[in-house]
Each structure stands twice: as C-alpha cells, then as structure tokens.
Amino acid sequence: MELLSQISFNLQNGFDETVIDLTKEAVEKRIPPDEIMNNGLIAGMNVVGEKFKNHEIFLPDVLLAARAMNGAMEVLKPLLIKDGIPIKGKVVIGSVKDDLHDIGKNLVAILLKGAGFEVIDLGNDVPAEQFISVAIEENAHVIGMSALLTTTMPVMKKVVDMAKDEGLYGKIKIMVGGAPVSKPFAEEIGADAYSYDGANAVETVESFFREDS
Ligand code: B1M
C-alpha cells in the first residue's frame, strides 16, 4: 500500500504509534508536509467522520483517530513553522463555546504561525466574551473562530455582534471556518471572511493586511 494510504488506513484504525512512525517515514522520504496532511491524515479523518455518521464506528474510535492525528501533527509542526520570519500581525484564534473539536483549528494556527503571524490560541470551548476581551487586551488584528457543530455556530454571530457593540467592527477583522460553516453563513452573521481550509485561512488573513496597507 502506498505510504499516504497507509497513514490514512492506520489513522482510521486509531493506531497512533504507527501513524506517527509512518508520518516520520514520509518526512524522511521528502513528501511535502501539506501532502502528508491532506492526502494522509485529513483523508483518513474524513473516512472516520463518514463511518461515525453511518454508525459503523463509535465515539471512542473517533477519539483514538484524533489522538493519532494530533501525534502526527506534532511531527509535522516544525516543518510548517519556520523560525525567524518577521511577525506580520496578531491573530486570536479558538474553537467556539461548547465545541471541543480543535484539530482543524490547531492546523490553521500552525499554518498561520508558519506564515509569520503571531497566534494567540485560546483553545477550545471559548466563550464569546473571551474572544473579544483577549482581542482588545492584545491589540489583535484578527479574530479567527472555528466551529465543527451546527449547534455551536451561533456563538460566531454572538462574537460579531459583541465586536460591533464594542466599536471593534471594521477595526478587527473576523474570520470563521469549520466543516459546517459556509460563505453564506459568514455573510449572514456579518463576519469579514470565511475560510475553507488552513491554506485558505492564511491567504485570507494575508488579504486583510493587503486591504489595510
Ligand atoms: Co465530532 N463530530 N463530535 N468529534 N467529529 C463531527 C464534526 C461530525 C460531522 C461527525 C459526523 O457525524 N459525521 C458531527 C457533527 C454534526 C454536526 O453538527 N453537523 C460530530 C459530532 C456529532 C460530535 C459529538 C456531538 C458526538 C457525540 O458526543 N455524540 C461530540 C461533540 C463534542 C463537542 O464538541 N461538544 C463530538 C466529539 C468528537 C471527538 C472529541 C471525539 C473528536 C474531536 C477531537 C478533537 O478535535 N480534539 C471528534 C472528531 C475527530 C470528529 C470528526 C470525525 C473529524 C473532525 C476533524 O478533526 N477533522 C468530524 C467529522 C468530519 O469533520 N469529517 C466530527 C479534521 C480537521 C483537519 O478538519 O476540523 O474540518 P476540520 O478543519 C478544516 C476546515 O474545516 C478548516 O480548516 C481545517 C483544515 O483543512 N477550518 C478552518 C476549521 N476551523 C477553521 C477556522 C478557520 C478557518 C478554517 O478560521 C478561523
């Protein structure tokens, strides 16, 4: 089996140590980290999501897959973040209140750091108030929110509304993302942008700075 398919297969089965070893092997074979991420790890996680939806696997299986994914992301992290890049701007990022999904958000944070942004990662289950207060304290340029559950998406609107109330609207850009989030939803709640993946999130944040200059 091809190496990236092996990574995907072992991730689906929650074999974290094998996934980590295969990821290291892929790095040694000079497969680009974004290819390992997209065609190995994320591809495997998508299958996990489908099987979970169809009740073919259960929550503990998903947790094992998530553990394998996080382990492999630690291997790839140093390759995605290069030292010595001048800081381009500050981004406060988190998964919204009641949402414990953080793999996608972590990936976006790693790629933003890799592109030269300072990232303040608030973790998961972040209340609307915290996004706003930290963004003000830290003089951030961008708030980035991730949601993986349809039930937690309304928190994003709460943050946009609070930003308006605090007079931040237009000063701090708000970007939203996550599997159930869409461009029409972002427009509906008044967010500045929607991003569909990590690379697109970097492009989006860079475009905010181009607009401002
Ligand atoms: Co859950 N889960 N989960 N889960 N889980 C989903 C999201 C689900 C779609 C599975 C399914 O039914 N097919 C479903 C949601 C249904 C819905 O609301 N539409 C679901 C459910 C129902 C649940 C629970 C309610 C299950 C239960 O308890 N019965 C529960 C809720 C817990 C909670 O949050 N309160 C739950 C729990 C969990 C685990 C804890 C076991 C685990 C999360 C572990 C962790 O994150 N540390 C988990 C996982 C792993 C998943 C799936 C399988 C994979 C998510 C993932 O990590 N994908 C997921 C199914 C799926 O999405 N295929 C599922 C890989 C990741 C790289 O992609 O996060 O989409 P993603 O991020 C992408 C883009 O979306 C984008 O860029 C990333 C890179 O490409 N992006 C951004 C994300 N955030 C962004 C922010 C940006 C920009 C782009 O700007 C700021």
Image (cartoon, grey):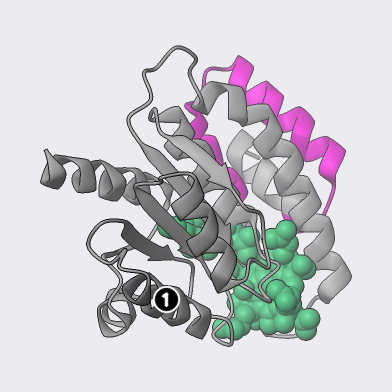
Q: Is residue 188 above or below residue 59?
A: below
Q: Amino acid at mark 1?
A: Met
| Bounds of the magenta segment | 12-41
Q: Residues within 10 Å of mark 1 (few under 14, many from 20)?
A: some
The verdict on residue 113 being magenta is no
Residue 88 rendering spot, x and y as whole percentages: 32, 30
Residue 11 rendering spot, x and y as whole percentages: 74, 51
Residue 40 rendering spot, x and y as whole percentages: 58, 44
Residue 92 visible, this orientation: yes
The verdict on residue 37 being magenta is yes
Residue at the spot x=28%, y=85% of the render? 188
Q: Is residue 200 left or right of residue 94?
A: left
Residue at the spot x=40%, y=33% of the render? 117
Q: How many marks?
A: 1
Q: Secondary structure at mark 1?
A: helix
| Dominant secondary structure of the residues highlighted in magenta in the image | helix
The quadrant the C terminus occupies is top left
Q: Is residue 74 left or right of residue 194?
A: right
* Quadrant in which ligand 1 is drawn: bottom right
Mark 1: is the Cβ under 8 angstroms from ligand 1?
no
Residue at the spot x=39%, y=17% of the render? 85
Extreme-top residue of the structure:
84
The quarter of the picture where residue 14 lies is bottom right
Residue at the spot x=80%, y=75% of the render? 57
Q: Residue tagged by mark 1?
A: 162
Residue 38 visible, this orientation: no
Residue 51 rendering spot, x and y as whole percentages: 69, 75
The quadrant the N terminus occupies is top right
Depth check, front residue: 105 or 66: 105
